[in-house]
Image (cartoon, helix red, strand yellow):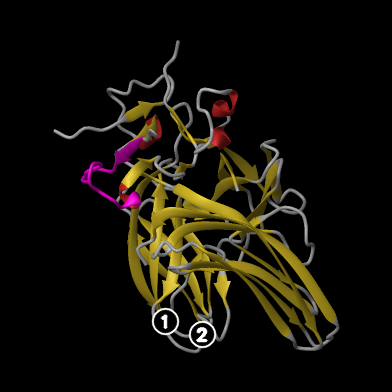
Amino acid sequence: MAELIRVSKQGVDVLGSAGTVPNNLIFDSNLNTFKIVASGTTTGTIPSGSLGTIHVAHGLSFTPPVTAFVKRRGFTNALTVGAFRFFPQDDYKFFSASADPGSVNFEINNTSSNAGTFDISYFCFEIPL
Amino acid sequence: MSYKIAISKNGIDVGTAILPNDFNYSSDYNTLKYYTGGTITLAGTAIGAFTTTTTQGIISHDLGYIPFFTVYMNPPELSSGPYYPNGYANLGAGANDYASAFCGTANLVVFIRLENGAGGGTQTGTATFIYKIYRNNLGL
Amino acid sequence: MGMTMRVSLPGYDCLTDGTIDHYSIYADSDNVLIKEFSRGTINIGPTFPNNQGTITHSLGYIPLAFSFANSGGTQVFVSGNDLSSSFPFHMNVGTSNIVLTNNKGGTITFSYFIFYDQL
């Protein structure tokens, strides 16, 4: 008999049939838990009306899957990749997040009439691509 | 000596495994932990030439920091169909429609934006957003 | 008395640390870990209608899913938007499949990860 560890959500009997449904569980040792192998923050400045890319070394021995969030300095909200904010708010678009063997890269289109400093939080996941 | 919990994948010896991808779980690594989610539907109307209408929906999370979040949205011009992660933009010949989201230390905000061009007319749109908010602090 | 399971990250004391973000498992409340359902790769391109690829998941609900496009050795996160002219890829997710689109031309290899966790 194979052993396993399961932790069910509140109100779900882990020993009952509902406890075998992955969507009812917090954790199941039979299923891969997507792991964050590296994360961090970085900052860059992009001129007004410009598309720019901010880079930072990820320090991994493989090219990782990466996602990220960005917040414009002086504003209070963060965007995910593919999201955007219009004038008169933060006024930029988070075009892309990508990784190559050495760095993670974040492409931001600053559609504002002012230069902007952008703070980025990124997450690299476990699986070599 | 530090301790940890590690569960290797089938066929892999947990005593010798070293790569993250060899484990189903290892306490050496952080994980994405979500704690709340839901669905919200927004509707908007833009009437007349060069008119822009933005409709927002606010979801309180009260974490006190900006958390990792995911938002999927279906297209305002279709009001149905599959969901698009993080942002959606439809740039048409006479009108544009957008759906997206942003998050602060207290609220996740989703929105649709309808833009009419020179032709004017009435543009209506409805989009449903499915969101998940995680415990993971972005540190922003 | 309710039971729980807590596993702290390296460097943190699970008996005293009150910050949930310092744990990889904190089952007191529903801090649910995302659980992988399937993963794979698919080659998509070069032009319409072959610039779209469909992956069937048959979960019956909208799941969390991530996809990454390999563009010349650079792995690009795929969102619902192809805002970037350098990386014009996007995806959508339905209750039975996910659809990936390559608007760059050529043939692009996409990696995908689908999770059990319902949105």
The reply, left or right, for residue C36 in relation to residue B114 is: left
Which residue occupies 58% across, 30% down? Answer: A21
Give the quarter of the image for residue B40.
bottom right
The boundaries of the magenta stretch are: C5-20
- The total number of labels drawn is 2
- The three-letter amino acid code for the residue at tag 1 is Gly
Above or below B71: residue B32? above
Q: Nearer the viewer, residue C74 or A126?
A: A126
Marked residue chain, label 2: A
Residue A12 on image: x %, y %: 54, 33
Determine the residue positioned at 34% across, 51% down: C21
Residue C67 screen position, x and y as percent:
56, 48
Q: Which quarter of the rendering shows the N terminus of chain C?
A: top left
Residue B123 can be seen, yes or no: yes
Q: Is residue C57 above or below residue C76?
A: above
Q: Label 2, on which residue?
A: A112
Q: Chain of mark 1?
A: A
Q: Main secondary structure of the magenta part?
A: loop
* Residue A16: % across, % down: 56, 23
Q: Quadrant of residue B23?
A: top left
Q: Is residue C114 above or below residue A55?
A: above
Query: Within the magenta stretch, is there residue C9?
Result: yes
Q: Check disc 2 and report its element: helix, strand or loop.
A: loop
The single residue placed furthest to the left in the displayed view is B1
Q: Residue at x 56, y 72 (%)?
A: A84
Q: Mark 1 Cα within 10 Å, few/some/many (few <14, many 20+)?
A: many
Dots 1, 2 in contact, CB < 8 A: yes
Tell me if residue C54 can be seen. Answer: no
Amino acid carrying label 2: it is Ser
Q: Which residue is mark 1?
A: A116
Q: Is residue B25 above or below residue A73?
A: above
User: Badge 2: few (under 14), some or many (20 or more) residues near its Cα, within 10 Å?
Assistant: some
